[in-house]
Image (cartoon, rainbow, N blue to C red):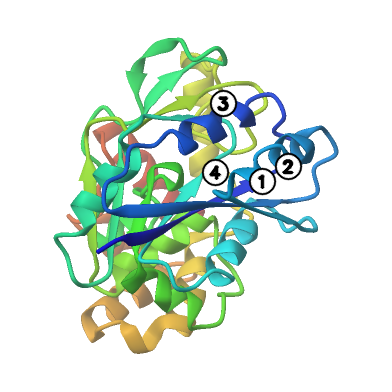
Amino acid sequence: MIKRLAILMATYNGEKYIKEQIESILNQDTEDSDFTLIIRDDGSTDNTKNIIREYVDSGKIIFIEGQNKGAARGFISLLCDNPGYDYYAFSDQDDVWNHNKLQKGIWSLSKYTGPALYCSNCELVDSELNSIGRNTHRKRPNYTLESILCLASCAQGCTSVFNKELASIVQENDVPDTFIMHDSLITCLCALIGGTIIYDEIPSMKYRMHDDNIFGMVSAKQNVINVIKDRISEITKKRTISMYDQAECLLKVYKKYIDSNNQDICRIVIDSKVSLKARLKLIFNKNLQHTTLNKTITKKLEILFGNG
């Protein structure tokens, strides 16, 4: 039976690289599945929209011209407005996908009947797609509920493929008032409702590092001094949207899908905004782990200082 998959791409001033990304998507090897690329532009002022229009006649692309919502709400808007697919995938505008990226995700998800999310490692490349000698993750991420809610782990949106059982929960409910990014919302929701998160350590795509990245891992020019500065900033700087705010909004909207134990964990995260006792519970929780000891200590200090 043919499975239908929607690839959701939010664009904004992406003229430099979007053509390569669209080509890599249209050249995907898929078996027993039919995919549609749905692109929502967020008010680009460069040539992005004209480039996209060149592909519309292929029949594989649906193009929506929208007003500026920002990346997070742009992606979730695409998800909510396109029910009825068996699988969904998020796509950034400036990467290049390996030919089997979608198929690997579908194969992995097909083994599960409940809500499930597939994500993978990425090969980091420069603006010309030359490897910079490392992947996104050196070690396997810790996808425990505590790590995800406290922002120590998140399924990277551009690698994610998820099933209709997870997507439908977002589509059938109000969008939370506050969430950090689309991938953070989906990952947190999957973990909160007891869904399955599948991590593939083999890269499924090339993640382009360039100075124009709006969101991303690190700057292409980042050095040791910058890393240290970033660690200090993480510990001391207040976030625009905190883990507490996101957790509170997610619990409010999706409470009926969350069992009592996970609700309790979520409330500890929420309470840690003002409660030292709750912060200490998180700091000493063995399930709250980043991929390295250094990052784990940074995250726990961040929580201790109330800057989650």
| Labelled pair 4, 1 in contact (Cβ < 8 Å) | no
| Labelled pair 3, 2 in contact (Cβ < 8 Å) | no
Front disc: 4 or 2: 2
Amino acid type shown at disc 2: Arg
Residue plotted at (26% across, 38% down): 291
Front disc: 3 or 4: 3
On screen, residue 284 versus residue 185, left or right, reads left
Q: Which element carries disc 3, helix, strand or loop?
A: helix
Amino acid type shown at disc 4: Thr
- Find disc 1 in the rendering and name its residue: 56
| Labelled pair 1, 2 in contact (Cβ < 8 Å) | yes
- Which disc, if any, is residue 20? 3
- Find disc 4 in the rendering and name its residue: 236
Assess disc 4: are there few (<14), some (14-19) or many (≥20) residues with their C-alpha within 10 Å of its C-alpha: some
Give how far apart the Cα atoms at labels 4 and 1 are. Answer: 47 Å
Mark 3 vs 4, N-terminal side? 3
Give how far apart the Cα atoms at labels 3 and 2 are. Answer: 15 Å
